[in-house]
Amino acid sequence: MNRQNDTRDEADTAVFGSEQMLTPAPTEYIPQHKTLPEIAYQMVKDETYPQTQPRLNLATFVTTYMDDYATRLMNEAINVNYIDETEYPRVAVMCGRCINIIANMWNTPEKSKWKCGALGIGSSEACMLGGVAAWLRWRAKRKAQGKPYDKPNMVISAAYQVVWEKFAQLWQIEMRQVPISLEKPTLDAKAAIAMCDENTICVVPIAGVTWTGLNDDVEALDREIDAYNKKTGYDIPIHVDAASGGFILPFLKPELKWDFRLKWVYSISTSGHKYGLVYPGLGWVVWRGKEYLPKEMSFSVNYLGANITQVGLNFSRPAAQVLGQYYNFIRFGFDGYREIQQSSMDVAQYCHRNIGEMKCFTNYADHLENPLFIWYMNPEYDKTAKWTLYDLQATLQQSGWMVPAYTLPKNMEDVVVMRIVARQGMSRDMADMLLTDIRNAVDAFEKLQYPTTSRIAYEKREKQYGKVFTH
């Protein structure tokens, strides 16, 4: 058979009647021969079937739903590289507009036409940029004073996101951690100040702690830092890690001072692909003014009178997310964002209330500050339980839900919790389905005659190391 006829035969073969669907997918080497696109598509698509569907993933903060027009707009820009500003100058202009909008949302004092900020692949890159800027400013000042600059440190709650550990390791900065506890579940401002000295490049409070959903009190920290700086002559600044809270607080708690209304807040980072409501990956960082962004971190492009500062650790990056963010700002406006965030908060509060009423659980906090919360096993119930929260996670996963169980950070490693993150796309009906699945799972666990494997492991650890708080 000649090649032309062979190709025609392949094209006429049903996807599930093809030889490729009967052979294992490649795992080590690129296949020798070509595969028809519909067959390659099906092979890759089938790999995703055992996974949790994105909207049922209540572990992630990342946006899993955008409307059809937003999805279409981003798909049409999937081949656009943001960094090619000469070829795609209007994308750069839209990015500058997004930075302006976000900076003003955070009450920037900067009066210039284009506010000082930068685009990131996610909030992790945005955090890195904020941290690097603080480090470079501190180093430049120490050099100018003729003082050593080889031992920088930063102060942060022990409930930090892992990017800060990466930042500290990569730039060789000592990360001083303020412990948290059930009594003090957020950053203790006075304890943070006690860890500061002349080598402190910044203090990092968190708006929307990943572990707990709570907010550090940035206003209280600002007061403490102001008094400390006046006493010592230092100028230790604040970088606010607002990965989640940056798009929640302006809409749901506009009266709360956590942003550039505070004297020592020099930079703020957030995640556009979390409550910015854009598909991943997108982050933003904004500085109080251009004087707070070291010159060695930036370069500028001028197009039709728009002087747009370009800053980033990455070079090539997708432009589609910028279009998605700008679309959201136009599409929703302030009122739309407020309604969506309030809807997520309402769903989270509904789940929080219902889970708190179950005898086997205790909510970590009695109120919500963001659309997420954590809970743990009621200590009294836990004394006779034959199961753990890890068993509940596994059972829920069988129904497609991803509700994570994990231990809290340093000094609270024995506290095992579960977390629900409510986002755009999670409805009251979905919440009811989840709560029903949780109740059904608990009912089944309470009928167990023997402890589960994870419970046995927990009790073994308890005997070996002493009382563990709770599973």
Image: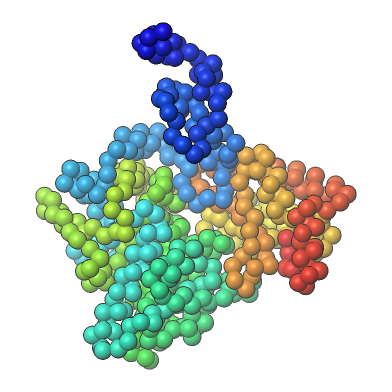
The image quadrant that residue 320 belongs to is top left
Task: Tell me residue 437's x, y (percent).
Answer: 70, 42
Task: Tell me residue 65's x, y (percent).
Answer: 46, 40
**Image position of 364 (left or right of 111):** right
Query: In the orientation shown, which residue stands out farthest toward the right?
Result: 449
Identify the residue at horizontal 46%, vertical 37% (top origin).
29
The image quadrant that residue 298 belongs to is bottom left
Q: Please indicate, yes or no, whether residue 383 appears anywhere in the rendered image.
A: yes
Depth order, front residue of 74/262: 74
Q: Please indicate, yes or no, whether residue 73 appears anywhere in the rendered image.
A: no
Identify the residue at horizontal 53%, vertical 41% (top origin).
54
Task: Tell me residue 42's x, y (percent).
Answer: 49, 26
Eyeballing the image, is 423 above or below 174? above
**Location of the N terminus (image quadrant):** top left
Query: In the orientation shown, which residue stands out farthest toward the bottom?
Result: 231
Depth order, front residue of 76/457: 457
Identify the residue at horizontal 16%, vertical 46% (top origin).
86
Depth order, front residue of 363/116: 116
Q: How is the image coloured?
A: rainbow
Number of numbered markers: 0
Task: Tell me residue 265's x, y (percent).
Answer: 36, 72
The image quadrant that residue 172 belongs to is bottom left
**Location of the C terminus (image quadrant):** bottom right
Identify the residue at horizontal 40%, vertical 58% (top origin).
123
Depth order, front residue of 7/53: 7
Eyeballing the image, is 441 above or below 116? above
